[in-house]
Image (cartoon, rainbow, N blue to C red):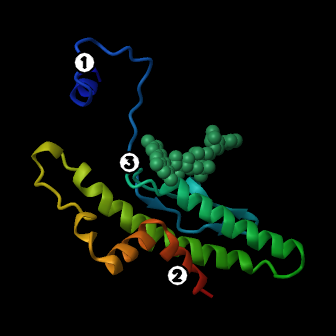
């Protein structure tokens, strides 16, 4: 751990390490997000590499989607089948957007010897001066695109 830290921050002394943990990166999505009255959301439903910062964000989107449906069921504006739509929408997004993007993000870091890996082209670099491409990139990485796609799922 000392050696690793010093590679990032080359100080001339040892770091005072209070504790450390191994974190295993998983890419997983539960087969079902709903079983009767039990509903999965956030990391319980899907986990992914933290690179790209999508885990918590997509979990918050689950919570918004679910809270909206629960409120409508509570106010007799919808029946419980709405909860199956939650699963259809959010599982689709977890697989097609969050997993797909985070697997792409993870690939260079996952190499056994990242320093020897061929340099990755910077995906954002060519977007300067190309407003349409930049807009598309931002819609995807901000998850706005995934929300719009989920709305189309009946
Ligand atoms: C290193 C790292 C960096 C990350 N960076 C980002 C980032 O930049 N952006 C981003 O969007 N996401 C990031 N994430 C992902 C994000 O932290 C998670 O997606 C998010 O915390 C999941 O929230 P959650 O509420 O679903 O689950 P959790 O945060 O895991 O919460 C579950 C809670 O349930 C409790 N619990 C478990 N079992 C029981 C039980 N039986 N009874 C009662 N309580 C229980 C746990 O103690 C815990 O407090 C990162 C994750 C890691 C590991």
Q: Give the alpha-carbon distance from disc 2 to disc 1, as whole Å.
A: 48 Å
The CA span between labels 1 and 3 is 28 Å
In the rendering, at what x and y percent does residue 99 appear?
A: 41, 65
**Residue lying at 22% horizontally and 60% vertically, measured from the top left:** 122
Image point (52%, 81%), residue name: 149
Q: Which mark lies nearer to you, 2 or 1?
A: 1
Please say whether residue 113 is visible from this viewpoint: no
Q: Give the mark nearer the N terminus: 2 vs 1.
A: 1
Q: Quadrant of residue 108?
A: bottom left
Compare marks 3 and 2 and give the one earlier in the sequence. Answer: 3
User: Residue, x 39% and y 75% (percent of image)?
Assistant: 135
Residue 16 coordinates in the image, percent (x, y): 38, 14
Q: Secondary structure at mark 3?
A: loop
Mark 1, Cα crowd under 10 Å, few <14 / some 14-19 / many 20+, is few
Residue 91 occupies quadrant:
bottom right
Kindly identify which numbered label has been placed on residue 154: none
- Find the residue positioned furthest to the top: 13
- In the image, 154: left or right of 120? right
Instruction: Determine which of the numbered discs, if any, sits on residue 25 in the image.
Output: 3
For label 1, the residue is 11
> What kind of element bears circle 2?
helix
The answer to whether residue 19 is above or below residue 26 is above
The residue carrying mark 2 is 149
Q: Residues within 10 Å of mark 3 (few under 14, many from 20)?
A: few
Q: Where does the N terminus fall, quadrant-wise? A: top left
Residue drawn at point x = 35 percent, y = 81 percent: 132
């Amino acid at each position: 751990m000392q050696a690793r830290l010093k590679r990032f921050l080359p100080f001339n002394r040892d770091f005072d390490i209070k504790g450390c943990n191994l974190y295993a990166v998983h890419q997983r999505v539960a087969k079902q997000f709903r079983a009767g009255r039990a509903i999965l959301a956030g990391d319980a439903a899907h986990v992914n590499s933290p690179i790209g910062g999508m885990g918590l964000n997509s979990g918050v989107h689950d919570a918004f989607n679910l809270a909206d449906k629960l409120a409508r069921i509570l106010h007799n504006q919808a029946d419980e089948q709405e909860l199956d739509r939650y699963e259809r929408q959010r599982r689709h997004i977890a697989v097609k957007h969050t997993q797909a993007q985070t697997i792409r993000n993870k690939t260079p870091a996952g190499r056994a010897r990242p320093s020897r890996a061929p340099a990755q082209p910077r995906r954002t670099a060519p977007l300067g001066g190309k407003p349409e491409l930049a807009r598309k990139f931002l819609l995807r990485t901000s998850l706005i695109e995934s929300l719009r796609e989920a709305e189309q799922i009946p």
